[in-house]
């Protein structure tokens, strides 16, 4: 018989931490803590299997689930010494979600479930604290109303604010028992007004509805958004954790908090966190009140702090990773409600991994698997220039490090619109963020909140995304309707309106008026050590895609071992070059084209010399001209007139030429090697510039072995023809300089036909480089420029799980790559094979390249460390 429910309590649990897929991360870790003897309130976990079957059955419970819940509820009553629904000694429970992969703040939680008009009186009688009981009751109605009945939070918040105003108090904790009792009645009346039904009184019905709501929350919009952003599968389902309530809101001897066993921002080995006295857990993570540092708990409740200190050390040693803990203190007694591997900034991830190797908690291989390659992106972006003059407006908590510059927006929708549709950099400013803001947080450069702490929703999610974040900046006063915030300074009030530019320093918490110059990051010894471990392990070489000496140097500094793609067309767009390029395109005969190209050749040679010098003898793959010629010509009447005047031709003749070059589908048109078949003088000029640069540098003592790459080859004859011109250019230049140089001529495999005939192509090519952008485009028949119009529907309907232009389609495009490698090496066993599309910086695509036996991947300069780590992890994953 299938089992759906797993109990934990009294020092024994039916599950363990290795059952995350079944129990969810939270349920598995609650079971593990129980088995370790950590004080955990008893409870039970409804498995992810039940969630999946709930969806398969169209929102109905599978047979047997109700009976198991009732059976385990009896066990819970026995363990807690209380009875669910009792008017004398009521058992209240929390209902929390918990997926196999952590989704912080994405799923819904309900506390104090089981309260009604009768049980609240029993709670008062048992606790002797009417204020606490009605505070718990009003919290329950609000959470249940929002999560289960789908009523907006702000309706309840408005009633709470009105009550505080009427009672002339500012804090929730200042409301009396009588005021809270009246507020409960107002909340119930609001529920009835909006739903046309009474608030449910039966605890069993409350529990059934709450479990359904948690199941449904797996597929709410914010959970789906977070999973899409984090590339988490959508078919895992969530567990439901039903646990006896313990109360942090029973007065000054109670409290709640969130803590990390190390600093999640820096990685420093110190206990880090926050707590609130007389509060429930949601108050801390939701940022409703600004909490106190965990160190102050030692003074407020020394005994609870001492026990918490022992437990956090025990848990970190047991899990061998930095832990994120949630705890509650009920009348000085400590309970742990959750532990999980803590989300951390990239700098912290690297430092913790290195430190734990030194502490012998983990080995180097485990350390390399502890850091997600994408996280390294956070370390490679600018910070505030220390020399910059700053106009500091306010200071909050440095919740997620880094720096951000952008125009202020006040809601997630505007952040997305301004960023994606208008192409603007934005900073999202909120009172506090909620899970609904995740899309806007992802679109923003940084996040600023007026309330909340270092463990608030904004802080945790921003750190996970690698976004700069300042939280708890109480000096800013936000008017969300007016779309501005005010800061009172010594010189008077400063208003910052929507669209104004601010700069955030996430490392100090400073909010700065205006745009500040940012500085290139400096990587510390922990990073260097970590990357040395990765380099010692990986098999794949890592090159970069770079078209300038500046990009080449950045890539070298990040550890690039050569250039896998130098796009020569980018060199023609400079102001002093574009005119000559246009002269060549507009020429009516070969002689005039050659004349125009002669103007470009010395400029090309200078470009190549700069790049070769920056790479200091490392291999450089130069792709000859690829895009269609119309891309170099003007668009629009105004630009057409300007260019015609500059080139001293009529607008009519220019328009005629532009029209003649128009193509219905230019990506499949007259481009790449097809241009060189039509106009051989283009590739001849480029080849001469390459070999002139090589010969001149050889005389200066720098040996360069260029790799000349011919694009868009689909027919063997195309390669044979164009390669012949390259060889003749090389021989002419070598003869002129009276020297011999080494060079390779190869091709991009980006047309499916080339992959199918790779054995023939390998007869001429000395290397292959997979141009996976075009190979993906031509294999799927998708236009990469237009796919965004329909891709969201493919995600929504589960037709595709990831964008194939972001992460390589391993079953389709990957099969072509594997075929081409096998066919090519059957002809040339030592054939050098790499990849230079955008996939060269994607971790899962790099893992595929390792398995497929490629020699190298090539990616943008700032992705080089990501590729180095991904290549090392690919080795470890293949071993495991």
Image (cartoon, rainbow, N blue to C red):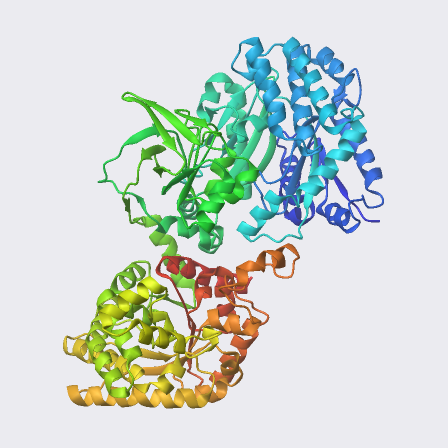
Asked if residue 21 lies left or right of residue 478, the reply is right
In this view, the residue in front, 61 or 437, is 437
Q: Can residue 278 be seen in this view?
A: yes
Q: Can residue 342 be seen in this view?
A: no
- Residue 59 against residue 166 in the figure, above or below: below
The percent position of residue 566, horizontal first and vertical second, equals 33, 70
In this view, the residue in front, 347 or 57, is 57
The percent position of residue 650, horizontal first and vertical second, equals 28, 73
The percent position of residue 223, horizontal first and vertical second, equals 61, 44
Q: Which residue is drawn at 49% across and 69% down?
A: 849
Q: Quadrant of residue 534?
A: bottom left
Q: Which residue is drawn at 66% across and 9% down?
A: 178
- Residue 848 against residue 216 in the figure, above or below: below
Q: Which residue is drawn at 65% across and 58% down?
A: 798
In this view, the residue in front, 771 or 486, is 486
The percent position of residue 377, horizontal first and vertical second, equals 40, 52
- Residue 105 against residue 828 in the figure, above or below: above
Asked if residue 90 lies left or right of residue 870, the reply is right
Total marks shown come to 0
Q: Residue at x 48, y 60 (%)?
A: 843
In this view, the residue in front, 552 or 649, is 649
Q: Quadrant of residue 396?
A: top left
The quadrant in which the C terminus is found is bottom right
């Amino acid at each position: 018989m299938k089992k759906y429910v797993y109990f934990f309590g009294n020092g024994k649990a039916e599950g363990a931490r290795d059952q995350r897929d079944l129990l969810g991360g939270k349920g598995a870790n609650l079971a593990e803590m129980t088995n370790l003897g950590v004080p955990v309130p008893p409870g039970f976990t409804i498995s992810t299997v039940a969630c999946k079957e709930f969806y398969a059955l169209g929102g109905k419970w599978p047979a047997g689930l109700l009976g198991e819940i009732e059976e385990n509820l009896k066990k819970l009553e026995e363990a807690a010494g209380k009875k669910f629904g009792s008017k004398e000694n009521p058992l209240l429970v929390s209902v929390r979600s918990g997926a196999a992969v952590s989704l912080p703040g994405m799923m819904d939680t309900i506390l104090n479930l089981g309260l009604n008009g009768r049980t609240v009186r029993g709670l008062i009688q048992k606790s002797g604290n009417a204020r606490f009981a009605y505070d718990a009751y009003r919290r329950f109605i609000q959470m249940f109303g929002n999560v289960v009945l789908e009523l907006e939070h702000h309706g309840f918040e408005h009633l709470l604010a009105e009550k505080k105003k009427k009672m002339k108090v500012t804090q929730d904790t200042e409301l009396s028992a009588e005021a809270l009792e009246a507020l409960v009645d107002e909340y119930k009346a609001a529920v009835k007004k909006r739903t046309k039904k009474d608030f449910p009184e039966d605890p069993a019905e409350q529990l059934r509805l709450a479990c359904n709501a948690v199941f449904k929350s797996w597929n709410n919009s914010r959970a789906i958004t977070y999973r899409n952003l984090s590339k988490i599968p959508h078919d895992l389902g969530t567990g439901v954790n039903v646990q006896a309530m313990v109360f942090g809101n029973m007065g000054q001897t109670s409290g709640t908090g969130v803590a990390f066993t190390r600093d999640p921002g820096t990685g420093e080995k110190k206990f880090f966190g926050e707590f609130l006295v007389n509060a429930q857990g949601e108050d801390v993570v939701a940022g409703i009140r600004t909490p106190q540092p965990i160190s102050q708990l030692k003074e407020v409740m020394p005994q609870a702090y001492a026990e918490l200190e022992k437990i956090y050390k025990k848990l970190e040693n047991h899990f061998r990773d930095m832990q994120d803990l949630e705890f509650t203190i009920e009348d000085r007694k400590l309970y742990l409600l959750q532990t999980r591997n803590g989300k951390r900034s990239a700098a912290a991830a690297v430092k913790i991994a290195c430190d734990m190797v030194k502490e012998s908690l983990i080995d180097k291989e485990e350390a390399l698997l502890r850091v997600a390659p994408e996280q390294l992106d956070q370390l490679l972006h600018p910070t505030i220039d220390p020399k910059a003059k700053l106009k500091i407006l306010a200071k909050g908590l440095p919740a997620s490090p880094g720096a951000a510059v952008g125009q202020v927006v006040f809601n997630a929708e505007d952040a997305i619109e301004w960023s994606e549709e208008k192409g603007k950099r934005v900073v999202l400013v909120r009172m506090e963020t909620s899970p609904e803001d995740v899309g806007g947080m992802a679109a923003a450069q940084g996040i600023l909140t007026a309330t909340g702490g270092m463990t608030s929703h904004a802080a945790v999610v921003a750190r996970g995304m690698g976004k700069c974040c300042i939280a708890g900046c109480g000096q800013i006063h936000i008017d969300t309707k007016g779309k501005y915030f005010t800061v009172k300074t010594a010189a008077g009030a400063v208003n910052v309106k929507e669209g104004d530019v601010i700069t955030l320093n996430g490392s100090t918490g400073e909010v700065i008026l205006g745009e500040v110059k940012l500085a290139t990051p400096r990587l510390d010894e922990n990073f260097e050590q970590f990357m040395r471990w990765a380099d010692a392990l990986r098999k794949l070489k890592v090159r970069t895609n770079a078209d300038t000496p500046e990009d080449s140097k950045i890539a070298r500094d990040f550890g690039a071992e050569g250039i896998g793609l130098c796009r020569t067309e980018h060199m023609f767009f400079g102001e002093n070059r574009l005119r000559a390029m246009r002269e060549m395109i507009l020429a009516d005969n070969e002689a005039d084209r050659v004349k125009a190209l002669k103007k470009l050749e010395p400029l090309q040679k200078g470009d190549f010399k700069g790049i070769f010098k920056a790479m200091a003898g490392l291999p450089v793959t130069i792709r000859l001209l690829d895009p269609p010629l119309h891309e170099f010509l003007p668009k629009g009447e105004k630009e057409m007139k300007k260019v015609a005047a500059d080139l001293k031709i009529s607008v009519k003749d220019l328009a005629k030429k532009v029209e003649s070059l128009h193509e219905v589908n230019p990506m499949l048109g007259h481009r790449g090697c097809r241009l060189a078949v039509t106009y051989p003088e283009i590739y001849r000029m480029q080849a001469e510039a390459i070999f002139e640069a090589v010969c001149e540098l050889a005389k200066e003592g720098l040996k360069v072995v260029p790799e000349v790459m011919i694009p868009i080859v689909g027919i063997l004859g195309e390669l044979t023809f164009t390669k012949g011109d390259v060889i003749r250019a090389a021989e002419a230049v070598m003869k002129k300089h009276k020297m011999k140089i080494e060079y390779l001529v190869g091709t991009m495999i980006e047309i499916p036909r080339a992959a199918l005939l790779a054995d023939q192509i390998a007869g001429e090519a000395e290397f292959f480089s997979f141009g996976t952008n075009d190979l993906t485009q031509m294999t799927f028949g998708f236009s990469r420029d237009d796919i965004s119009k329909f891709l969201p529907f493919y995600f929504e309907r589960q037709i595709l799980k990831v964008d194939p232009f972001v992460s390589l389609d391993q079953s389709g495009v990957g099969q072509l790559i594997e075929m081409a490698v096998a066919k090519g090496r059957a002809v040339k066993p030592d054939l050098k094979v790499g990849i230079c599309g955008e996939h060269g910086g994607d971790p899962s695509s790099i893992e595929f390249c390792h398995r497929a036996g490629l020699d190298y991947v090539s990616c943008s300069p700032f992705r080089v460390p990501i590729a180095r780590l991904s290549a090392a992890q690919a080795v470890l994953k293949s071993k495991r």
